[in-house]
Amino acid sequence: MKNTPSWLKSAIFYEVYPQSFLDTNGDGIGDIPGVIRKLDYIQSLGCNAVWLNPCFVSPFGDAGYDVSDYRKVDPRYGSNQDLIRLFKEAHKRGMKVTLDLVAGHTSVEHPWFQASASPSQNKYSNWYVWTDSAWTESTREMPLIRGFSDRNAAYMPNFFHFQPALNFGFQEPDPDKPWQLPTNHPDVIAVREEMKDIMRFWMDAGADGFRVDMASSLVKGDPEMKGTIAFWQDVRAMFDSEYPDCVLIAEWSFPKHALQAGFHMDFMIHFNTEAYTSLFRDERKRDGFLTPGTPYSHSFFDREGKGDITRFLRHFTEHFEATRDFGYISIPTGNHDLTRIRCHRTIGELKVAYAFLWSMPGVPYLYYGDEIGMRHIDGLSSKEGGFGRVGARTPMQWNRKKNAGFSTAPASKLYLPIDPSHARPNVEDQEANASSLLNHLRSMAKLRKAHPALGANGDFSVIHGKKGKYPFIFIRRYNDEKILVAVNPANRTELVKLDRKYSRLRPLKVAGVSLKRNGPDTELVMKGVSYALYLVESARQCTF
Ligand code: NOJ
């Protein structure tokens, strides 16, 4: 793949939500030294790259997605020196660290915004999207916050009201609204160059790239994404010429656009497609963060067995085919915005889901705690703008000791409470249990590493993926190697007659699946909640 850092093709990422990972100074909140201490653990899972959620100075109205100093680590996590040490320690182990770049907005407390809110004209007046009157009315397309300061203007928020949109210009400025600056306005270009300098600052310090928050949100009035795509292509040109080994990863959820824009990878999660929700998250739509008003439906990975894999395939196949020569798609186990994948699933069901995720093309992403099946904790009070999302952000469960080994602080001082269940899973117990979820994931990572067909670049073709039907069976292929992957998340036995070209199958990892031979025909017998990976052998290779 042209100009794509080669390490990405064998990457498995681990997302660390720093506040909840490991607290090393007893203040009840996780920190960067805690991430360093757990690098060996992360690596033991087969993960060789970390995505660290925002760790910069912030008032934490949105858990750090409201930055007030892009060049400084927030003291609650440590110092810039700690972050640099994290880069070094990761590199010593052959691992990578990517940071979270909140490019579309800052906190209202950022000095740029404070200056921009001033009624007197200054360098930063145009750095945010301000109208020309405090009375400009919000519209559906353009919500506005009025009366923030004595500047006679209203500003556009990008997410919550305290996250004002940085001004990357308007693709088609309305001539009747001169405050809508074009993308080539000198002040707009100054914002773009500043964002690039921030990236340079951290890559020069040792970061291996960025996951870009809301990457599609930058240029306003840009329905076809032309301006936003052009913006990122410019950033990508900088990567190619100055930081060719660093990666740009989008939170866009529309890989066709994101990869055209120059991102090396995009997540396929919420927002524009139903692809991800139809796999894992439909049951929870009614609970909040995901698009309200979307009709309740059933996930494919659900033991009720009422899902429909074609809802996923329709989107995935289209985006995969269109982007596979340019970069990767990632289907993560979860993230800090989504309900935990564990929610209402058993460990057995998670094993099936992970067998699928670790066998797909692109790059796997593991959200901290999903390796042990941490639960989604309902009913918590909101913290730092998390609302329903806080249930997926509770402290990591390391062992059976105080605060599950997360912190030595009194329980009342923890960032969020630990899962109160006595049966809560933890790393130490699962390490000691060969059949645990954690060890399942380790063996999936080993398989993926050992078999290029299962890797990022292999082909992907469906051999059984019918509307409303189970199981889902697909072939991964790279050069001469072919692997058949079958998953049956439904809690009922399913039989599938395989094409004769798949009659010679060598088991790689099988749970609850058997092969029934009937003369020259082979039938796959899949018990409820089962999975199997088989190497497809040619007659020459056959070992039985
Ligand atoms: C997406 C982030 O993942 C989420 O946590 C945050 O609240 C919004 N973007 C706003 O930055």
Image: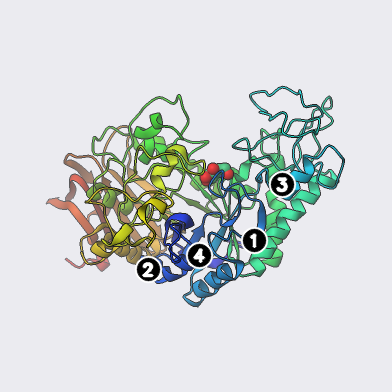
The answer to which quarter of the image holds residue 483 is bottom left
Marks 1 and 3 sit apart, C-alpha to C-alpha, by 29 Å
The foreground one among 158 and 454 is: 158
- Give the residue at x 45% y 60%: 27
Q: Earlier in the sequence, mark 1 or mark 4?
A: 4
Residue 85 image offset from top left, x and y in percent: 55, 73
- Binning the other alpha carbons within 10 Å of mark 2 as few (below 14), some (14 to 19) or many (20 upward) gives few
Residue at which label 2 appears: 41
Residue at which label 1 appears: 72
Q: Nearer the viewer, mark 1 or mark 3?
A: 1
Q: Earlier in the sequence, mark 1 or mark 3?
A: 1
> Regarding mark 3 in the picture, which secondary structure is present there?
helix
Residue 394 image offset from top left, x and y in percent: 39, 50
The foreground one among 253 and 469 is: 253
- Give the residue at x 40% y 24%: 295
Identify which amino acid the numbered label 1 is placed on. Answer: Lys
> Regarding mark 1 in the picture, which secondary structure is present there?
strand
Identify which amino acid the numbered label 3 is placed on. Answer: Ala
Q: CB at mark 2 closer than 8 A to ligand 1?
A: no
Q: Earlier in the sequence, mark 2 or mark 3?
A: 2
- Give the residue at x 87% y 39%: 120
Residue 64 image offset from top left, x and y in percent: 56, 50
Residue at which label 3 appears: 230
Q: Earlier in the sequence, mark 1 or mark 2?
A: 2
Residue at which label 4 appears: 32
Q: Nearer the viewer, mark 3 or mark 4?
A: 4
Identify which amino acid the numbered label 2 is placed on. Answer: Tyr
**Residue 504 appears in view:** no
Marks 1 and 4 sit apart, C-alpha to C-alpha, by 13 Å
Above or below residue 117? Residue 419 is below
Marks 2 and 3 sit apart, C-alpha to C-alpha, by 40 Å
